[in-house]
Image: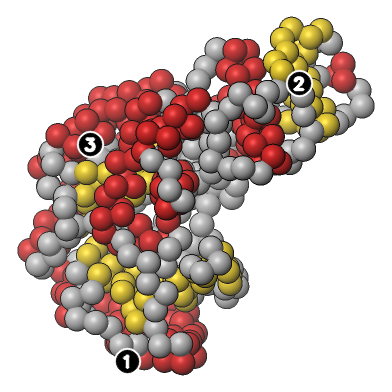
């Protein structure tokens, strides 16, 4: 158990997130009076950070605001950075461990780089601050700058353009790492009832685009697993979208077909007939034992079959997701996964690092304690080197809480096969209108640099 005595100009949440980088399982409390009931006690003040073990102070560091470079002029912001910087150094020495992202705990690290570039900072100035103040690894800094360069070459801020997100929160089975609101269902009657309301919502919101003179740049149908719907139901959904919205020809139109056990030739043809030009077939692992262990009811053979059927149906942009850090997997598993990637040749690959979130089976079972950070680091490096050697480039990147090794999720793609929707939603530079249970509309106010969120009801019923 760790007790924090906080007497500084910084939030509990910022301190909590920083400690979680080093200690992913201990209970953390703030300002508990009985200090001696805690093995670790950390004192955080504006001028000093110290650590006590069993009642004895074993180390302390001064907080020095002036010595640190920063992207900000405001003293309050610089002080918070200095406190985080100092606490990180203290924890790094105590736990004898470092983080690739240093003190940064946010989900959108590339956004920090991009907005700082827009404010006039040079690449070299950004590198210096991220290294000296944020204490990031040099290789991480270079990846962020590289991804930002790709994004800046592809994205354009346009307040008149938007994307649509349509959520289908149903799956054929529930993965043990999943924290989404998705329900297990393949009952055609229940799915039809959900579609009834979704189609009504599509009709109700259509006037938003007309009255605000907005144009659609991409549509993303996610889940859950949208292809849990029958071919008839998929056709009904796509026809409703097309009926109520002006969809430009050859725009990016994505459907997550993540589970190969929900894919067949008829559904694939239905997607093609309705102008879908990008799909995801997400194995997560190409190891049958792992698939069974995480709650999936399909085999590696099913993944290969579904991928080849999609190619035969004419899909030229196929994404595949892999999850690093799944139980029982190591560098040999990563090599096996990549062997299939080389064989199947998807245009787009996303490497996720397992994130243990509230609401998932793994969170309830405290699987977080079983993750081998060293093994996942080795696999991450292998994936990065191999995919780039194959000619792919990292084009978008984001992070999650409780992520393995304090790492990230990174999308790789061959040029002209990047998913613009993914980049826009992560970088928050385009308005996304959400449909379906649990979806979130994000209205981007580019003029005032603000995001307005409007969440749909999470209750599927």
Q: Nearer the viewer, mark 3 or mark 1?
A: 1
Q: Nearer the viewer, residue 204 or 189?
A: 204
Q: Is residue 55 visible?
A: yes
Precedes in sequence: disc 2 or disc 1: 2
N-terminal of the two: label 3 or label 1? 1
Label 2 residue SS? strand
Q: Residue at x 23, y 36 (%)?
A: 337
Residue 113 image-quadrant placement: top left
| Percent x, y of residue 115 | 45, 51
Q: Give me the C-alpha separation between circle 3 and circle 1.
A: 41 Å
Q: Is residue 83 above or below residue 180?
A: above
On the image, the x and y values in percent for residue 240 come to 35, 88
Q: Classify residue 204 as left or right of residue 36.
A: left
Whether residue 85 is situated above or below residue 244 in the rendered picture:
above
- Marker count (numbered): 3
Instruction: State the quadrant of the N terminus.
Output: top right
Label placed on residue 337: 3
Q: What's the coloring here?
A: secondary structure
Please name the residue shown 12% across and 47% down the image.
345
**Which residue matches tag 1?**
243
Query: Which mark, by number, is residue 310?
Result: none
Q: Residues under labels 3 and 2: Cα distance?
A: 47 Å
Residue at 24%, 63% in the rendered image: 279
Question: Which quadrant of the rendered structure holds the C terminus?
Answer: bottom right
Kindly report the distance in space between the C-alpha atoms of the residues bearing marks 2 and 1.
62 Å
In this view, which residue lies farthest toward the right?
33
Can you identify the residue that label 2 sits on?
48
Mark 1 packing: few (<14 Cα in 10 Å), some, or many (20+)? few
Q: Nearer the viewer, mark 2 or mark 1?
A: 2
Asked whether the viewer can see residue 1, the reply is no
> Where's residue 204, x and y in %?
49, 90
**329, 396: nearer the viewer:** 396
């Amino acid at each position: 158990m760790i007790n924090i005595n906080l007497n500084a100009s910084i939030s509990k949440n910022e301190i909590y997130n920083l400690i979680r980088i080093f200690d992913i399982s201990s209970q953390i409390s703030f300002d508990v009076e009985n200090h001696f009931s805690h093995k670790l006690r950390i004192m955080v003040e504006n001028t000093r950070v110290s650590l006590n073990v069993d009642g004895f102070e074993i180390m302390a560091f001064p907080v020095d605001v002036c010595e640190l470079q920063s992207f900000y002029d405001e003293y309050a912001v610089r002080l918070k950075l200095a406190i985080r910087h100092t606490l990180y150094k203290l924890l790094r020495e105590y736990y004898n461990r470092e983080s690739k992202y240093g003190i940064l705990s946010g989900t959108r690290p590339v956004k920090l780089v991009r907005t700082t570039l827009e404010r006039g900072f040079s690449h070299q100035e950004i590198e210096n601050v991220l290294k000296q103040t944020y204490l990031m690894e040099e290789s991480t800094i270079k990846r962020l700058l590289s991804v930002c360069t790709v994004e800046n070459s592809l994205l354009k801020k346009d307040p008149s353009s938007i994307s649509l997100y349509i959520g289908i929160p149903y799956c054929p089975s529930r993965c043990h790492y999943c924290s989404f609101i998705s329900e297990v269902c393949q009952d055609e009657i229940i799915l039809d009832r959900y579609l009834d309301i979704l189609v009504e919502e599509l009709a109700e919101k259509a006037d938003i685009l007309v009255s605000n003179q907005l144009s659609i740049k991409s549509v993303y149908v996610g889940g859950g697993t949208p292809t849990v719907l029958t071919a008839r139901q998929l056709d009904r959904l796509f026809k409703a979208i097309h009926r109520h919205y002006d969809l430009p020809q050859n725009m990016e139109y994505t459907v997550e077909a993540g589970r190969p056990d929900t894919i067949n030739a008829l559904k694939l043809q239905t997607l093609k007939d309705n102008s879908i030009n990008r799909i995801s077939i997400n194995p997560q692992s190409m190891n049958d034992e792992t698939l069974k262990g995480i709650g999936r009811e399909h085999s590696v053979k099913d993944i290969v079959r579904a991928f080849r059927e999609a190619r035969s149906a004419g899909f030229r942009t196929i994404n595949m997701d892999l999850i690093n850090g799944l139980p029982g997997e190591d560098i040999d598993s990563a090599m096996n996964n990549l062997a299939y990637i080389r064989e199947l040749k998807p245009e787009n690959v996303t490497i996720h690092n397992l994130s243990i979130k509230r609401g998932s089976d793994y969170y309830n079972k405290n699987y977080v304690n079983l993750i081998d950070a060293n093994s996942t680091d080795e696999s991450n490096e292998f994936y990065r080197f191999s995919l780039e050697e194959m000619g792919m480039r990292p084009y978008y990147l984001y992070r999650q809480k409780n992520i393995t090794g304090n790492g990230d999720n990174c999308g790789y793609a061959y040029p002209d096969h990047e998913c613009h929707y993914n980049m826009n939603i992560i970088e928050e530079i385009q308005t996304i209108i959400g449909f379906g249970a649990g979806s979130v509309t994000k209205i981007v106010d580019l003029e005032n640099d603000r995001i307005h969120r409007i969440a749909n009801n999470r209750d599927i019923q």
